Image: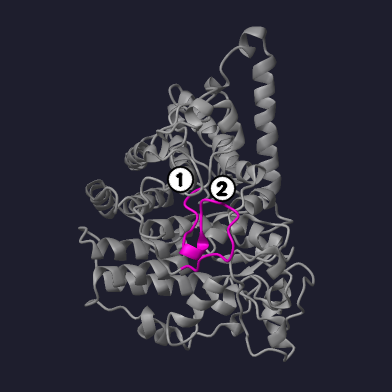
Amino acid sequence: MKSIIKKLCLFSFSSLMFVACTDSFEDMNKNSQTANEVSPSLLLPKMQDYGFNNNSWEYQVGPNLHTNLYSQYFANTATYFNSGRYGYNNAWVNDGYWKSYYTYLPKYLNIVKEQVKTRTDYTYMFQVMRIISAMGAIRTTDVFGDIPYTEGGIGINQPKYDTQKDIYYDVFNELGEAVDVLKSNMENQKAYGEEDLFFNGDYAKWIKLANSLRLRYALRISFIDPEKAKLEGEKALKEEMMISNADNAAVRNSTLDEGHCLFIISYWNEFRMSKTMEKILKETSTVEDPRMPIWFGQTIGWVNGESDIQFQGTPNGLSTSDLGLDEYKATNNSSVWGFYAYKQWNLNAKGSKSGTPSGIVEKPMMLMNYAEVCFLKAEAAIRGWSGAGSAAENYEAGIRASFEEGRAQVEDKSVIDTSKDDTYITTGFAKWDEAADFETRLKKIITQKWIAMYPNGDEAWSEFRRTGYPDLMPISQSEEPSINPENGEFIKKLRYVDDERRENKDNALSSDNNQGQGDGMNVRVWWDTKRYK
């Protein structure tokens, strides 16, 4: 039903634009940004769905072949993919990251921005779009560094590039103003319904998300701009943020016959759990992480009695020849078909797809969860920010929230084992130590946040670049000449797409970009303060 509704919405939008553009030759020459007959309800689903890669192709060539590998949630097992070795594919980067922002977010935002001047009943709906666009802007600048922002996506042929610092500062304003308006008790305001793929039009949850994002972005700049970070972070901490998993921000998949993109593309046997993920899930505490069988599948060797390794990961960045070895083949390493998505894998382990897993269509793509907010507060606390509460309490709450979130959508509750929860939290490196130094406590927080944000590779990669945590393993081989994994070096950002370098070269290729570093895969973004190689 939701799929049908959305298709009708998009058809209606297309019809409206066709009528508006063929009414007269005079109308054809009007800027499409000023269209004032298109309801925000027809635009928001496209912003949420396509703006955040919630379709199989865009998800695969975006997060799956890039940030999910860079953050080392997964490792590539297909010989024909090279992005795990830092190889660059322009079509993938363009479809996976550049177009998802510029095609759907600022353009649609500006359409409604013009309409609100006369349609004041759209004011609250517009604030939601501001929050969505702000999320997309930060995601894009975190991946590329300096980008077109004030002139991006609004029909300017050669838009200028804004500094990442300026983009962050403006996003703080956007989020703050959006919250203020949504709290203003304006009358006669229209609201979204099912077309809001995040919260079904619940403005209270949008307020919580905006404040939570403000804290996320404040901590993102905490090493490079500590005064501004504290100012924005403490403003967020005074407001209402996510308080439980019921507030999680996740985008529902709009195509009912597919389900969550991650689980659909996982059947192609092109990636598996990474060796880093295996190590962290097995060694962070004195017991294995209770989330491992929820997220990942047993190895075929274990099921067949041929191996003593139940869960196994693949090293990142293996050469084509190494990927041909039996030990690194997809079927000999852990898939993402744990109890969460495909219980038959861990109970019977057929070793391949055997029918479509039930229930995965209800599993949305998580963009921000309550567990992350707990860890944000824990870090704010060790930094001494007012309103953050207890670091220890927030840290433990984050772990428990992650346990709860993972288990909530496991259909067969009989497979859930909670007996090791307390031991996991209170032993090994996972155990909180209030007397430890700042770096030790930060590493604990970020390691647990990295786990809890799985499989949000975009955020996990950004947090590694910001903090240097958790301990990732240098890739086995790099196809990017400027990055030497033998020296412990990692990829820093994605370079700009070919269209920009060709058609907007004066801006895209300016040596002034990215703090005078220009462009490149070994160029650090503004908030990256060299806490890793």
Asked if residue 306 lies in the magenta stretch, the reply is: no
The residue under the point 35% across, 72% down is 444
Is residue 329 in view?
A: yes
Q: Specify the quadrant that holds the C terminus.
A: bottom left
Q: Name the residue under label 2.
A: 52
Pointer 1 residue: 135
**Amino acid tagged 1:** Met
Q: How is the image coloured?
A: one colour
Considering only vertical position in the picture, is 186 above or below 377?
A: above
Mark 2 touches mark 1? (CB < 8 Å): yes
Numbered circle sitting on residue 86: none
- Residue placed at 51% from the left, 62% from the top? 485
Q: Residue at the location (45% across, 35% down)?
A: 126
Whether residue 368 is visible: no
Q: In this view, does 389 lie to the left or right of 151?
A: left
Give the crowd class for mark 1: few <14, some 14-19, many >=20 residues within 10 Å.
Answer: many
> Which residue is at the front of the view, 223 or 303?
223
Magenta part of the chain: 472-493
Q: Where is residue 274 in the image (x, y as percent from the top left)?
A: 58, 70
Rendering quarter of residue 43: top right
Q: Where does the image place residue 169, in percent across and percent down from the top left?
A: 33, 39
Residue 385 horizontal side relative to residue 178, left or right = left
Provide the secondary structure element on which disc 2 rests.
helix
